[in-house]
Image (spheres, rainbow, N blue to C red):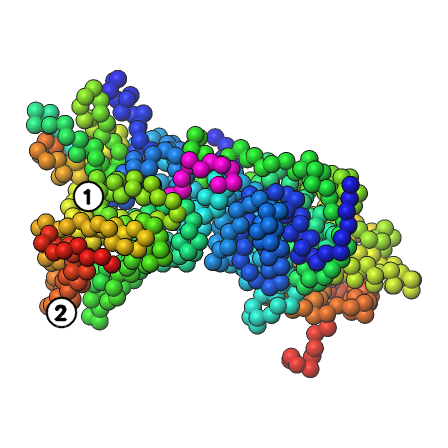
């Protein structure tokens, strides 16, 4: 009975009882992000999965002050909060946006760019599940090439999204931000370190976290971290840091896996494996991974390249 | 100690905002409000205003910045017009729903398309359902005074809603008029610092922006309706309190001008009210019993105050510088809804007047009063609105 | 209970919603095998693995049975067992 009581109290800044799907990569990432920032943060979240599963009226897991305003304006609401904190001399309190790819890559992109151009003191963490998952899995600018989504499904005339994934970390680094990094829930310690490091900078900072989605990507809920690691180790999800636009670290791939292994682990690429005429697409995806590996020098034996 | 200066309308507004000591100002240019934010920028650059001045990349962000600042517990301000106000619409609805107060100057201008920088109130009426309070002013002096009242209204613990002070573009923003300023210490005593009960606080973490199901959503809307109802009384009180402080009384939720024994009452909002007053005087000198109800508060709609002013009249001509496409003018729709069915209510006619910047001189206003009077000799009600100065040569 | 102004609510209130009812499978620890590395706590999206009296304990009030703890456990000390309804 005593044990149960202690367990019930909950600890940490992101507590139990939220309504994320089983095995949600995003929920896991948020726990670790807040562990790294500590309690003196105000968090803004644009509309999306994270907002929805954490804010049914009366049931909030956020043990930090948190605001969801709209879909398009995570960055600008954060800017307003940061400005207020400055005027109120509450500068030990930091501002964080934790938002999905829809609100970051697409509808909130203008506001994000504006925030970075102004140099506002906000850490923007994009928890990226690569589609509008909250509404059932529609294509976003973050959807990788040839992934199936409900608004770009495979069919007789389609192999899924033909375009490249928008390279948002590169774009944000090119804004001159002091710190930009990519991370994955497959590597939680690395994620925590990067968030903690980002907190030592002032100005606009961006971290993109690959957060595999069991419901949307089509894999069993216990495989979230494994799929995350596959994404990293096949080369499609490069893990690196850039400071003031220059590449300062990469996570080397010790054991490279072919892109096909990553595809086989998920339902959203299944069509490529089952369609007879999809060989070109598989090769193209492998080539994309190869070029990423080369650009960032991700293999253990290659030299580190600067951007 | 009072001082008076001839200043541009935009500068007067900036000086009023300055006196209210906002923490955060967001700025995005759009004619005809830009002079306001430029004046504030100069003041910030010279250390006359201590605020975080944020040049944003769109009006959506301008409204979002003041919303975030408000949630963090800071007094905040922005200004926009026309397309900019349209772009802010979603943000204003959300902030009203979350009870985040801030003040916007809505410098009224036509909405595209066709694009125009002429004046009408279409931008304001398009925001009428949002939960934002809307005050309209006739003169630069009234604009100055109304902004100081606006912050107090917005931040009242029983209100906590965004407030927009609407002023006609060019006519008021770019006119030079003598303005009496209120002493800073008087403004400070009238408007204490903003200290909301709920704000983003790491020592007391709370959650804003939850989603609500059908068991509570209507109740949330109802609570805003209740706040608006409460606001009617509170706005009257605040205007009155300010008038005692300044010695300038612009009226309450409405201003009644020569309505006491009027048979024909015109109802207008914005700078045209000044011209209507002149026209009323002229028509009175010719023996016509005309009066004006100047609507100062559009939302919440002060139908009680209007009724008291018009109930003795025989006909009311509403001058709507706006048009709800497919129906009629917004004030017409609001008033007819509240007056219809009241015993011995005056006949109510909606005039679309000044839409698209169509000039309204004394003759036009006399024409409106004439048409209103003619309606009295017809049994049937005037259902369709009457378009003033419409040019039949260019439209079928 | 009356609605709050602006729908603002206190943080941490989600604890009132017990997501344990979502489970089809339940993680069961073998304490003989467990080496207290803490991986299960690290990888739980529900934050429902607690340290209680020096051991890692699963709070079944909230455990959704996703299986991440069982899959990631380096010594395979956790098994997923079908939930008894």
Up the image or down, A235 lies above or below A31; here it is below
- Evaluate whether residue A117 shows in this view: yes
Residue depicted at x 54% and y 55%: B27
Q: Mark 1 lies on which chain?
A: A
Disc 2 sits on a residue from what chain? A
- Tell me if residue A91 is in the magenta stretch: yes
**What residue is rendered at 20% in x and 19% in y?**
C53
Q: Do labels 2 and 1 share a chain?
A: yes
Q: Residues within 10 Å of mark 1 (few under 14, many from 20)?
A: some
Q: Is mark 2 on a helix, strand or loop?
A: helix
What is the distance, in whole Å, between disc 2 and disc 1 at their CAs? 31 Å
Circle 1: element type = loop
Residue B224, how many percent across, how many down? 56, 42
In the rendered image, residue A52, in percent from the top left (x then y), is placed at: 36, 45
**Residue at the (27%, 55%) spot, across then down:** A246
Image quadrant holding the C terminus of chain A, namely bottom left
Magenta-tinted stretch: A86-97
* Residue in view at x 48 percent, y 41 percent: A86
Residue bearing the label numbered 2: A280
């Amino acid at each position: 009975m005593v044990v149960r009581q202690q367990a019930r109290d909950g600890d940490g800044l992101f507590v139990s009882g939220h309504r994320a799907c089983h095995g949600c990569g995003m929920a896991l990432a948020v726990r670790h992000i807040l562990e790294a920032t500590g309690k003196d943060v105000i968090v803004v979240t644009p509309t999306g999965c994270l907002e929805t599963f954490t804010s049914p009226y009366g049931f909030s897991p956020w043990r930090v002050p948190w605001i969801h305003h709209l879909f398009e304006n995570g960055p600008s609401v954060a800017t307003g909060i940061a400005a207020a904190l400055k005027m109120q001399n509450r500068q030990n309190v930091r501002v964080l946006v934790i938002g999905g790819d829809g609100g970051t890559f697409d509808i909130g992109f203008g506001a994000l760019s504006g925030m970075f151009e102004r140099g506002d003191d906000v850490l923007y963490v994009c928890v990226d599940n690569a589609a509008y998952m909250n509404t059932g899995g529609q294509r976003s600018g973050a959807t990788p090439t040839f992934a199936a989504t409900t608004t770009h499904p495979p069919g007789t005339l389609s192999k899924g999204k033909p375009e490249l994934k928008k390279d948002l970390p590169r774009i944000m680094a090119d804004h001159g931000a002091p710190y930009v990094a990519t991370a994955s829930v497959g590597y939680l310690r690395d994620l925590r370190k990067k968030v903690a490091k980002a907190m030592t900078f002032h100005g606009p900072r961006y971290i993109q976290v690959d957060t595999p989605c069991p419901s949307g990507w089509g894999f069993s809920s216990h495989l979230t971290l494994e799929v995350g690691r596959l994404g990293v180790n096949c080369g499609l999800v490069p893990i690196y840091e850039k400071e003031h636009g220059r590449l300062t670290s990469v996570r080397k791939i010790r054991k490279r896996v072919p892109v096909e292994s990553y595809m086989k682990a998920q339902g959203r690429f299944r069509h490529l494996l089952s369609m007879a005429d999809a060989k070109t697409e598989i090769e193209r995806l492998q080539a994309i991974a190869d070029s990423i590996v080369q650009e960032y020098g991700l293999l253990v034996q290659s030299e580190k390249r600067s951007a | 100690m009072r001082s008076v200066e001839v200043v541009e309308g935009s500068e007067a507004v900036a000086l009023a905002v300055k006196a209210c000591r906002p923490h955060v100002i967001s700025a995005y240019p759009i004619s005809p409000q830009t002079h306001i934010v430029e004046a504030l920028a100069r003041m910030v650059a010279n250390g006359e205003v201590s605020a975080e001045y944020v040049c944003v990349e769109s009006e959506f962000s301008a409204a979002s910045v003041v919303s975030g600042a408000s949630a963090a517990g800071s007094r905040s301000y922005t200004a926009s017009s026309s397309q900019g106000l349209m772009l802010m619409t979603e943000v204003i609805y959300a902030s009203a729903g979350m009870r985040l107060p801030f003040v916007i100057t809505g410098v009224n201008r036509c909405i595209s398309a066709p694009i125009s920088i002429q004046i009408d109130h279409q931008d304001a009426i398009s925001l009428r359902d949002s939960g934002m309070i809307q005050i309209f002013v006739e003169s630069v002096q009234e604009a100055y005074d109304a902004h100081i009242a606006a912050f107090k209204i917005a931040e009242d613990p029983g209100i906590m809603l965004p407030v927009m002070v609407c002023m006609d573009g060019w006519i008021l923003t770019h006119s030079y008029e003598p303005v009496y300023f209120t002493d800073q210490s008087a403004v400070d005593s009238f408007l204490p610092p903003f200290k909301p009960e709920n704000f983003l606080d790491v020592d007391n973490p709370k959650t804003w922006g939850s989603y609500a199901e059908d068991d509570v959503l209507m109740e949330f809307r109802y609570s805003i309706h209740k706040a608006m109802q409460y606001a009617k009384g509170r706005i009257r009180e605040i205007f009155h309190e300010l008038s005692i402080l300044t010695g300038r009384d612009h009226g309450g939720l409405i201003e009644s001008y020569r309505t006491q024994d009027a048979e024909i009452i015109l109802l207008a909002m914005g700078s045209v009210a000044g011209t209507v007053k002149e026209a009323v005087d002229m028509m009175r000198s010719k023996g016509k019993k005309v009066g004006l109800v100047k609507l100062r508060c559009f939302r919440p709609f002060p139908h009680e105050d209007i009724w008291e002013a018009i109930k003795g009249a025989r006909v009311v001509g509403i001058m709507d510088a706006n048009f709800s496409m497919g129906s009629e003018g917004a004030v017409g729709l609001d008033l007819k809804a509240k007056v219809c069915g009241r015993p011995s209510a005056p006949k109510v006619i909606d005039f679309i007047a000044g839409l698209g910047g169509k000039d309204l001189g004394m003759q036009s206003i006399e024409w409106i009063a004439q048409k209103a009077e003619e309606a009295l000799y017809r049994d049937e009600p005037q259902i369709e609105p009457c378009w003033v100065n419409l040019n039949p040569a260019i439209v079928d | 209970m009356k609605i709050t102004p602006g729908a603002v609510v206190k943080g941490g209130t989600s604890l009132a919603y017990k997501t344990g009812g979502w489970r089809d499978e339940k993680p069961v620890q073998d304490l003989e095998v467990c080496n207290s590395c803490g991986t299960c706590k690290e990888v739980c999206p529900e934050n429902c693995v607690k340290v209680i009296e020096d051991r890692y304990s699963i709070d079944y009030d909230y455990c959704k049975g996703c299986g991440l703890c069982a899959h990631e456990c380096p010594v395979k000390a956790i098994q997923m067992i079908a939930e008894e309804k």
